Image: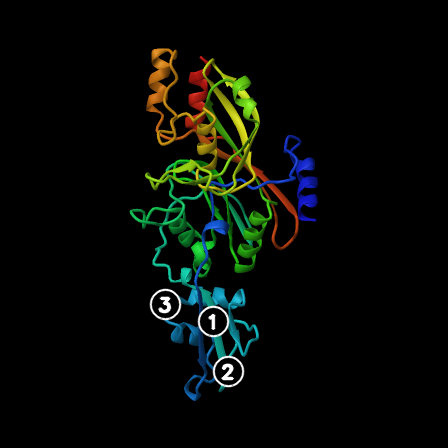
Amino acid sequence: MREHAFNQAANDDLSDLPNLSSLNDNDDEFAETDSPSPLIKSHTVGESDIGTRLDKIATDVFDGFSRVQIQGFIDDESLLVNDTPQKSKYRVKLGDILTLSATLDNYSEDLPENIPLDVVYADDDVIVINKPVGLVVHPGAGNRTGTLVNALLYHYPDNAHLPRAGLVHRIDKDTSGLLIVARTKTAQLDLTEQLKDKSVYREYQCIATGVPSDILRHATIDVPIGRHRIHRTKMTVTDGGKPATTHILSATPLGTHYSLLHVRLETGRTHQIRVHLSHVGHALLGDKVYGGLPKSGLAPTTRQAVIDFPRQALHAHKLGFIHPTTGKALVFSRDMPSDMVKMIGILQE
């Protein structure tokens, strides 16, 4: 049903949107990689707490959570009173049993930071962000600050009660483009399921080495991807990896050595577009990890421009999903950033 609704909206809104028989485009899906550890806490109301607001007593007795986080748990029914949802303003009674069911992800030490966000769409349930090049999505070793999560916690403080501040999926630091963020636990679970059942549509634009006639011989790349045996930060094509399928929708020549591609994926493996295109001999321009070095035969100025390009030329261009509350099919697109536009102009000279 979801797939039918999304196809209809795509046909109405974007005539060039491909058939959605099997869609799921992702550099790295939390749905496939993360399994947060469950956490359950409970508290029985004593005489001294009778008449206290639910959000206040819960903040006092459940250490490690702010009042905003507690209110979020109440709103999404992660915090129950006698196994029944209540409002934050509920006044507790003697013997009430408060039960908090959360995840260890909620013990985030991530801090809000006033980092500007390009918000494409936002309502009470979802946010669509156009991520710039250079912004890390999620804090990790060496990147505790300055990430998209830190920005979300500043601009949307209620997201503090959600795992990963509501992130549903992620893209690489040096990849630009569209990302979905949930604003409620219910929306996050629903959107995660959409990723799993391949009813989310995402399409990328990229600059790859090679000419269209050669590239389109590999219109569908269907080989498994796994962690590199020696270089553990890299991915590689390997028989022991997870199934991965990439579809090249179109290829437009950029001079005589490069092409602009529109690509979609059926699966969500880390670095999938980069690994698959490198595997068939058409690495992304600027991708120093997977072989995007300058092609021989370029004019000196063009060759230097390719050498100087600081990242993989990859942009998450188009995004579509079913709204988790309204059931409406939503489709968004954003043009590639100026660095890719400029590089295309250089290659076409």
Quadrant the C terminus occupies = top left
Query: Could you give the CA–CA distance between mark 1 and mark 2, rounded to whole angstroms?
Result: 13 Å
Relative image position of residue 172 (x, y in whole percent): 41, 40
Q: Which mark is residue 96?
A: 2
Q: Which mark is residue 159?
A: none
The amino acid sitting under disc 1 is Leu
Which residue is at the front of the view, 222 or 12? Answer: 222
* Count of numbered labels shown in the rendering: 3
Pointer 2 and pointer 3: residues touching (CB < 8 Å)? no
Neighbour class for label 3 at 10 Å: few (<14), some, many (≥20)?
A: few
Applied colour scheme = rainbow
The amino acid sitting under disc 2 is Asp
Mark nearest the camera among 1 and 2 is 1
Relative image position of residue 65 (x, y in whole percent): 39, 67
Which residue is at the front of the view, 167 or 92? Answer: 167
Which residue is at the front of the view, 215 or 103? Answer: 215
Which residue sits at x=42%, y=67%?
Answer: 67
Pointer 1 and pointer 2: residues touching (CB < 8 Å)? no
Give the farthest residue toward the left. 142
Query: Could you give the CA–CA distance between mark 1 and mark 3, rounded to whole angstroms?
Result: 12 Å
Disc 2 is placed on an element classified as: loop
Q: Tell me the residue that label 3 is attached to.
A: 64
Q: Report the side of 325 relative to 177 (left or right).
A: right
Relative image position of residue 316 (x, y in whole percent): 50, 36
Relative to residue 303, is residue 309 depicted above or below? below
Disc 3 is placed on an element classified as: loop
Relative image position of residue 78 (x, y in whole percent): 51, 67
Which residue sits at x=32%, y=47%?
Answer: 143
Q: Tell me the residue that label 1 is attached to.
A: 100
Query: Could you give the CA–CA distance between mark 2 and mark 3, rounded to whole angstroms?
Result: 21 Å
Where is residue 161, by image quadrant?
A: bottom left
Which residue sits at x=43%, y=26%?
Answer: 283
